[in-house]
Amino acid sequence: MERFVELIYEELLPNIEVQSLDPHDPVVVSELPKPWITIGRGNYAVVVAHPDFPDRVVKLYAPGRNGWEEEVEVYRRLGRHEAYSECLHSDKDREFLVLKRLYGKTLYECLMKGVRIPKRIIEDIEEALDYARGRGLNPHDVHGKNVMMTSDGRGVVVDVSDFLKPEPCTMWRDLKRAYHRIYLPFLHDRPVAVPSSLMNGVRKGYRIFRKGRRLWGSDS
């Protein structure tokens, strides 16, 4: 761990450039030193990895975006659980975390690549969210890009940064409904790759739908 942290300060931080141009779109990484690679981009932060350290990643928040302190607290409450990552190191001044790396495909990727999503994955994630609630957390922003099927066929949650938000969130409930009402009867036994254009259209349409539902006071 000591050498990995040294590389973060010596190689990564002086040479990476991350911008959050729109809070509804993934951050933009315009500069990244080799051999670091980007493995994930959220609306507020980027996740990068170094090939010499395959069991950990760095999550770096974009300048001007809040959430670092809250995410550290979420991981403190979660402790160790098989369906979540673990915070191994954090730096408040530079706003980054070192996390245990989780391997697999997000459910969003599974749909795009035609990979079957067994019911066990949904059940694992549901159990993990119940565990988080038992730790005083409020699972929030749990959608297809933030949950994953691991290489050994288990469901995990890969982004917990919003689990301290107090307001209700129906994203996971809506995803489960779509899984049971659409995926199971039509795609589970004969999965097909869903075009990215269709996936993006569904994502944008769902965002509009949720905005309208909040305006009418029914997002609960």
Image: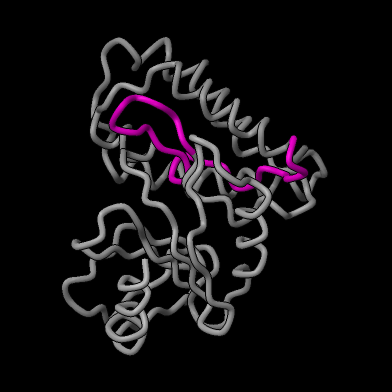
Specify whether residue 108 is painted magenta.
no
The image position of residue 100, as x and y in percent, is 41, 52
Residue positioned most to the bottom = 14
In the depicted structure, whether residue 78 falls above or below residue 122: below
Which is the main secondary structure of the residues drawn in magenta?
loop
Asked whether 80 or 123 is in front, the reply is 80
Q: Quadrant of the C terminus?
A: top right
Q: Is residue 144 magenta?
A: yes
Question: Where in the figure is residue 114, as x and y percent of width and height?
Answer: 25, 28
**Residue 83 at what x, y percent from top left?**
50, 36
Find residue 51 and report its horizontal and vertical position in percent: 19, 61
Q: Residue at x 37, y 51 (%)?
A: 101
Q: In the image, is residue 32 above or below residue 168?
A: below
| Range drawn in magenta | 134-156
Extreme residue toward the right, this view: 217
Residue at point 53% right, 76% down?
91
Q: Dividing the image into 4 quarters, which one contains the N terminus? A: bottom left
| Nearest the eye: 79 or 201 | 79
Query: Relative to 179, is 139 on the left or the right?
Result: right
Q: What residue is shown at x 37% (from left), y 32% (from top)?
A: 149
